[in-house]
Amino acid sequence: MSKLALRFISGKYKGKEHILEDGKEAVLGRSADADVVLMEDMVSRRHTLMMVNGDEITVTDNGSTNGTFVNGEKITTARAVKGDRILVGTSIMKIVDASEATQAVEAVHPTVNTAMKPSLGKSPVPRPPGMSNQSRTTMHSGARSMSGTIAEVPLPDLIQLFSTSKKTGTLVLNHNFTIAKIHLDAGRIIYASISDMPDLDPLKAMFRILSWEDGDFDLVGPEPYNFPTQIEMPTEHILMEGLRQLDELRRNKKNMPPFDADLAVPRPLEARLSALSAVELDVLQLVLNKQDMKLQQIIDASRLSDKEVVDIVKKLLDGHYLVIDDLI
């Protein structure tokens, strides 16, 4: 039976690790005598208690001000196992095998033995190497920032966590040098945008962002905004609908031309326009207004969801309303 460890995958202590002892309680909090000292203003003195029993951890919130979250759910007491994620303050921790732990957690686990404790009226004994005074300092200006990688914390899990913990701020994402922003108000997604597609509908942008599987994220303070429109769909529905669309898009992609394929309306057009619905005609008109339009451009230009546009384009191709340009 392997030991378990906490790996910090987001927040001020990202990259640090703490090995958990079987049968022993570990206290996480701001108190100097905590087993894992987290010096930030969103963490209570004795914020969270963890008790390891074999391959399972009992996680208990110790009446903290800002709560403890396991896999995005606010808990009083919960069971956690390898692979689960725990949020305390701005730190997201993942439970891993201790054998996978590669970096000591000196910055968040300042072990102080009796000989090192300063006596009253005497100068404190210097800390051992790697345990600087800075690790004991509350970072007020950056304490509410939360950063990490999408590979470690998938976006749906991250957004669910922010929703449950009612975070307010701007989630800035960097994916292959493309910047996206998701604006949150008390955990609710109110707007989303992608830097190289500024005119994309915010809900459509949000669904597109959910497909990102790698890159970096950083939750920063709320930015001033004056959005022309806001997303009204509840966050839970956004996640469910976005993941549904993504799953169907991946299935349909096998039957579609490449997204950089040029599409055009054949001349003469023999298929009957009267057989098309209004939304199908709208998609066809996008191509008519600008011949040799790429499939990706059609998807971006339409206000319909990506999945709806792909379904319509497939129907238009099958019905010979559209053709791949090099086949004309």
Image (cartoon, helix red, strand yellow):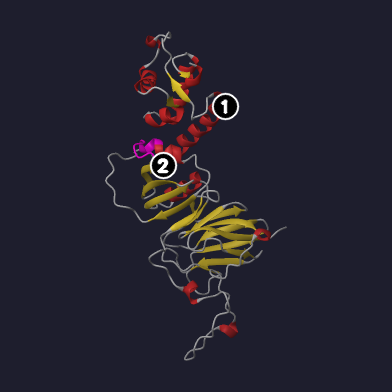
Q: Nearer the viewer, residue 170 or 27?
A: 170
Amino acid type indicated by mark 1: Lys
Task: Check the picture and name the quadrant holding the N terminus.
Answer: bottom right
Q: Nearer the viewer, residue 325 or 272?
A: 325
Image coords of residue 115 (percent x, y): 59, 85
At x 55%, y 53%, the residue is: 85
Q: Please, is residue 202 above or below residue 113 in the view?
A: above
The answer to which of 298 and 5 lies nearer the viewer is 298
Give me the C-alpha separation between circle 1 and circle 2.
30 Å
Label 2: state its secondary structure: helix
Instruction: Identify the residue position indicated by label 1 in the image.
Output: 254
Q: Position of residue 29 (x, y in %)?
A: 49, 67
Q: From the viewer's perspective, is residue 194 above or below residue 148?
A: above
Mark in the foreground, 1 or 2: 1
- Image disc number at residue 77: none
Q: Which mark is residue 235?
A: 2
Badge 2 amino acid: Thr
Task: Point out residue 228 in the picture as x, y percentages from the top left corner.
Answer: 27, 40
Along the horizontal axis of the image, is 102 left or right of 262?
Answer: right
Q: Which residues are magenta?
A: 196-204
What residue sits 61% from the left and 57% below the top? 57
Rendering coords of residue 276 (x, y %): 39, 14
Residue at 47% over, 20% down:
325
Q: Is residue 182 visible?
A: yes
Q: Of callouts 1 and 2, which one flags the residue occurring earlier in the amino acid sequence?
A: 2
